[in-house]
């Protein structure tokens, strides 16, 4: 039947590979969160930096690493937010608003996967470098992270909260767009029809796009608050 033909077009070996990659990425993310949390918690309560060889690297080098890390993760979030914001326009231009053509659908889904890969490749290393170098800088400048000024601790705490938010909530909104063909579980993807048949915008779920936009807005608000803390330095005369 025609529905079977569409299923055969969308269920390709590449999608099965993506399922494995998605599950592997999830395990890596969980390991990364635990490892980074252990490093921060260990050096928060220690009076000496661990591992100690990090002290031998000059403070200026750590400052450069900190700046590059912050630039990578903030730039990745803002850039992908702006690109994703134009997703409905892209769908309209591709003809998917009026047609559920599998080839067009797969092209848009591949673009989404590419965007999310770019975001991950910038945000994860950026957050890691910024938090890691921030802890080391605190030890070198103030003797211990606990004795650092309030704005320094607040900024690092906020970045850690942001990292957890990004892994849990932001990635969940990505998952809702890619659907179970990519992850092997969860809900249908962006182009699954709603319970009423077809959404008001055509063959894509507008609610999922709105949810993704809200997640991006929250991530950008984290950035505004974070840079506000570092520039305005609340609590300092």
Image (cartoon, rainbow, N blue to C red):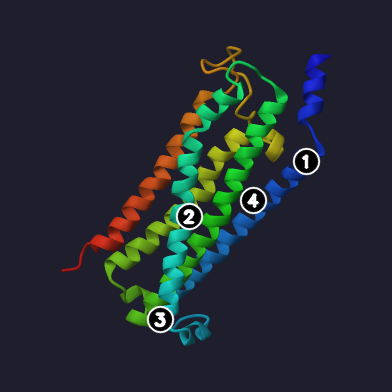
Left or right of 132 in this view: 226: left
Residue 19 sits above or below residue 193 on the image: below
Tell me the residue at 53%/47% (across/down): 168
Regarding mark 1 in the picture, which secondary structure is present there?
Answer: helix
Q: CA distance from mark 4 to mark 2?
A: 14 Å
Is residue 10 found left or right of 178 in the rendered image? right
Cα–Cα gap, marks 4 and 1? 18 Å
Q: Dot 2 corresponds to which residue?
A: 163
Q: CA distance from mark 1 to mark 2?
A: 29 Å
Residue 44 visible in the snapshot:
no
- In percent of width and height, residue 170 lies at 51, 44
> Which mark's residue is nearer the viewer, 3 or 4?
3
Quadrant including the C terminus? bottom left
- Residue 14's mark? 1
Q: Position of residue 65 (x, y in %)?
A: 46, 71
Which mark, by number, is residue 26? 4
Q: Earlier in the sequence, mark 3 or mark 4?
A: 4
The residue lying toward the viewer, choosing from 207 and 93, is: 93
Up/down of 183 relative to 97, above or below: below
- Mark-to-mark CA distance, 3 and 4: 34 Å
Left or right of 108 in this view: 84 = left
**Closer to viewer: mark 2 or mark 3:** 3
Q: Nearer the viewer, mark 4 or mark 1?
A: 1
> CB of mark 4 within 8 Å of CB of mark 2?
no
- Residue under numbered circle 3: 59
Using a 10 Å C-alpha cutoff, classify the residue at mark 4 as few (fewer than 14 neighbours), some (14 to 19) or many (20 or more): some
Question: Which structural element holds mark 3?
Answer: helix
Secondary structure category for the residue under label 2: helix
Which residue is found at the position 34% from the left and 80% from the top? 141
């Amino acid at each position: 039947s025609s529905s079977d033909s569409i299923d055969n077009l969308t269920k390709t070996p590449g999608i099965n590979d993506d399922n494995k990659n998605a599950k592997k990425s999830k395990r890596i993310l969980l390991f990364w969160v635990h490892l980074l949390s252990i490093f921060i918690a260990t050096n928060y309560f220690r009076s000496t930096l661990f591992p100690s060889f990090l002290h031998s690297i000059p403070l200026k080098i750590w400052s450069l690493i900190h700046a590059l890390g912050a630039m990578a993760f903030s730039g990745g979030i803002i850039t992908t937010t702006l690109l994703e914001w134009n997703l409905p326009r892209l769908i309209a231009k591709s003809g998917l608003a009026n047609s559920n053509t599998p080839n067009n659908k797969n092209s848009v889904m591949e673009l989404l996967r590419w965007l999310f890969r770019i975001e991950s490749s910038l945000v994860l290393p950026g957050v890691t470098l910024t938090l890691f170098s921030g802890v080391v800088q605190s030890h070198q400048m103030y003797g211990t992270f606990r004795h650092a000024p309030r704005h320094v601790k607040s900024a690092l705490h906020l970045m850690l909260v942001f990292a957890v938010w990004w892994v849990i909530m932001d990635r969940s909104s990505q998952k809702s767009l890619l659907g179970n063909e990519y992850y092997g579980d969860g809900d249908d993807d962006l182009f699954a029809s709603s319970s009423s048949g077809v959404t008001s915008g055509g063959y894509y779920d507008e609610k999922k796009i709105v949810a993704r936009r809200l997640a991006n807005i929250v991530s950008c608000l984290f950035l505004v608050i974070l840079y506000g803390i570092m520039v305005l330095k609340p609590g300092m005369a």
